[in-house]
Image (cartoon, rainbow, N blue to C red):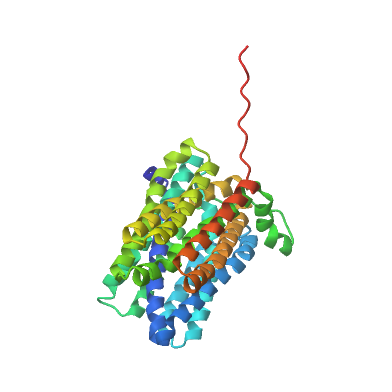
């Protein structure tokens, strides 16, 4: 897998992704502490609003950005967006009012909504070989999972010597480091796009996406992944602290189990995808997530939830989640040429986050209003709907007929 890092351009892009993820992880910790300092017991409401703003920016800005980035110099665009995010992060230590957090986060996440799809659409041009690109996708998945472990650890160490606001300077450094790494990289020149109206450019990515059977299936599987992922990310703290009565360290290990499942899948998928097509792998991953949710619901109904069962369920969910998400870049790569990829990746970015925007509040409402079993079964039902839609919208390609020997 690591041999793709011999490509100097990809190495710089990968390192820029790593430092960006670490900086973003530090900001997540710092935002929680800042919200508590400003709002006290209302910190949860502040963070919930921040998260909603983030999703709105992703869903609303990405398609618009994707309409125009194909006509701009990618290097200048990525560097410029990194600098905007760095400047925004540098303003956060001086915040004194909650509304200022909301405004800065909207600017930062709007820049991210343009940056991330552009970055993702650049990798297939840097690594045109599908086997290499598949390994790059797995490395990206590993980077995200390791960030979930590394960022809280680094934040804890930094808080021993700096204030909570000092973590934002780490975020600023991460974005600046990403800008420098991209600046020192020779990126492929994107194919020129024909002149189109603003409306056509803005909607082209989503129209292409929804007209492509494999991508309609991907959207349905995004719903499945969001349903299972929302159960993990929203309700783990309730299950660990409230239902099981365990401490914060147990919560950290529970989330680690989910990330470990995702990392195991990311390590195995390059070889698996060399032998299997994307569709069965992604459907298998969706099935694993559904099985994990329903199995935990059955455990609670039959006896009571145990920590071992929760760890196993989250490990299985993480494994399935990565099986669905990692091959998605391959589907997008095959569905458009270089000129249209930014718009298509932007459409995936917006539509997938729209699924999360639906499932996050649903997960919280089901758990708080009806309990763990209803939340598990309800989100599993949403996940099943996603799989059913994927099977219908993305039909299997029939194998060529084998002629009988004469």
Q: Quadrant of the C terminus?
A: top right
* For residue 35, side relative to residue 64 (left or right): left
> x%, y% of residue 47?
46, 77
> x%, y% of residue 302?
40, 58
> x%, y% of residue 260?
35, 54
- Residue with the most extreme front position: 302
Q: Is residue 191 visible?
A: no
Closest to the observer: 312 or 347? Answer: 312
> x%, y% of residue 236?
40, 66
- Residue with the most extreme left position: 160
Image point (52%, 55%), residue name = 120
Numbered circles on residues, count? 0
Q: Quadrant of the N terminus?
A: top left
- Residue with the most extreme right position: 197
Q: Is residue 231 visible?
A: yes
Q: Quadrant of residue 384?
A: bottom right
* For residue 395, side relative to residue 33 (left or right): right
Image point (35%, 57%), residue name = 309
Closest to the observer: 393 or 191? Answer: 393
- Residue with the most extreme top position: 406
Image point (34%, 62%), residue name = 254
Task: Establish if 271 lies above or below 224.
Answer: above
């Amino acid at each position: 897998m690591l041999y793709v890092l011999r490509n100097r351009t990809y190495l710089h892009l990968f390192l820029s992704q790593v430092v960006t993820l670490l900086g973003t992880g530090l900001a997540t910790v710092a935002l929680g502490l800042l919200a508590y300092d400003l709002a006290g017991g209302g910190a949860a409401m502040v963070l919930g609003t921040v998260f909603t703003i983030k999703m709105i920016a992703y869903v609303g800005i990405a398609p618009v950005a994707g309409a125009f980035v194909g006509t701009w110099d990618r290097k200048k665009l990525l560097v410029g967006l990194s600098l905007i995010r760095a400047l925004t992060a540098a303003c956060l230590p001086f915040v004194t009012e909650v509304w200022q957090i909301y405004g800065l986060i909207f600017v930062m996440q709007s820049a991210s909504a343009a940056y991330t799809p552009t970055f993702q659409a650049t990798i297939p041009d840097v690594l045109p070989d599908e086997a290499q690109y598949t390994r790059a996708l797995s490395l990206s998945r590993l980077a995200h999972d390791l960030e979930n472990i590394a960022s809280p650890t680094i934040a804890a160490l930094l808080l021993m010597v700096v204030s909570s606001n000092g973590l934002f300077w780490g975020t600023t450094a991460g974005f600046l480091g990403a800008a420098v790494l991209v600046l020192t990289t020779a990126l492929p020149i994107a194919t020129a796009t024909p002149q189109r109206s603003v409306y056509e450019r803005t909607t082209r990515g989503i129209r292409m996406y929804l007209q492509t059977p494999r991508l309609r299936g991907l959207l349905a599987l995004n719903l499945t992944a969001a349903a299972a992922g929302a159960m993990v990310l929203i309700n783990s703290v309730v299950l660990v602290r409230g239902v099981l009565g365990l401490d914060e360290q147990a919560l950290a290990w529970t989330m680690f189990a989910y990330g470990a499942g995702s990392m195991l899948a990311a390590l195995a998928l390059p070889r698996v995808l060399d032998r299997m097509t994307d569709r069965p792998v992604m459907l298998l991953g969706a099935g694993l997530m559904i099985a994990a949710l329903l199995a935990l619901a059955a455990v609670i109904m039959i006896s009571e939830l145990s920590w071992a069962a929760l760890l196993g369920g989250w490990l299985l969910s993480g494994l399935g989640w990565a099986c669905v998400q990692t091959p998605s870049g391959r589907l997008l790569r095959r569905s458009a040429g270089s000129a249209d990829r930014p718009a298509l990746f932007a459409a995936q970015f917006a539509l997938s986050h729209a699924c999360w925007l639906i499932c996050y509040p649903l997960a919280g409402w089901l758990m708080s209003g009806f309990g763990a079993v209803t939340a598990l079964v309800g989100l599993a039902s949403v996940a099943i709907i996603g799989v059913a839609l994927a099977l219908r919208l993305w039909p299997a390609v029939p194998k060529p007929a084998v002629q009988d020997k004469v």
